[in-house]
Amino acid sequence: MPANSGALEAIRSDQLSPPVGPFSLAVRSNGFILFSGQVGLDPATGKLVDGGAEAEARQLFANLATLLAVAGKTFGDVVKASVFLTDIADFAAVNAIYAEHFQEPYPARTTIGVAALPLGARIEIDLMVKE
């Protein structure tokens, strides 16, 4: 499907847990790939990994790397990231793990403290990638 066709093309991976709701893990449309928010789900169990925000962040980035690879992309192709934290005190630890995956020029980013996330996650990240 051409990148600018306007139609949505779902990106899937059987290496990841399926979505827990009526949404796609990622979609291609109009020259962009939009990645739904990912949390630190263990693909083998479909449950959040134990160990708090750092463990969740490491698993979340592994999941994003898998999904990016399925889309033929890498973290270097990311133009925008949104980070959601249930405890802003986790910012430094999550930021350090985030920095392991991105190089300059860094993507634009928003970090937001939220009251709660799906499945009791402590962190969620979504991405935007240009084709």
Image (cartoon, rainbow, N blue to C red):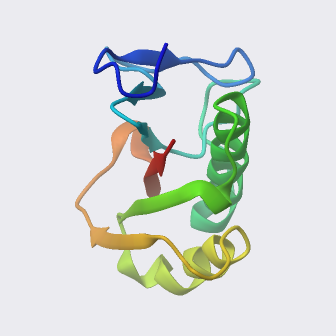
Q: Is residue 127 visible?
A: yes
Quarter residue 106 falls in:
bottom right
Picture coordinates of residue 55, whole percent (x, y): 69, 59
Q: Is residue 64 left or right of residue 116?
A: right
- In the depicted view, which residue is nearer to us: 66 or 7? 7
Residue drawn at x 73%, y 37% as measured from the top left: 69
Q: Count the numbered circles shown.
A: 0
Picture coordinates of residue 12, whole percent (x, y): 59, 17
User: Taking 100 as reference, is 84 above or below it?
Assistant: above
User: Taking 104 as reference, is 127 above or below it?
Assistant: above
Picture coordinates of residue 112, whole percent (x, y): 28, 70
- In the depicted view, which residue is nearer to us: 93 or 98? 98
User: Taking 7 as reference, is 31 above or below it?
Assistant: below
Q: Is residue 11 left or right of residue 85?
A: right
Residue drawn at x 45%, y 51% as measured from the top left: 127
User: Taking 117 as reference, is 107 above or below it?
Assistant: below
Picture coordinates of residue 116, whole percent (x, y): 28, 53
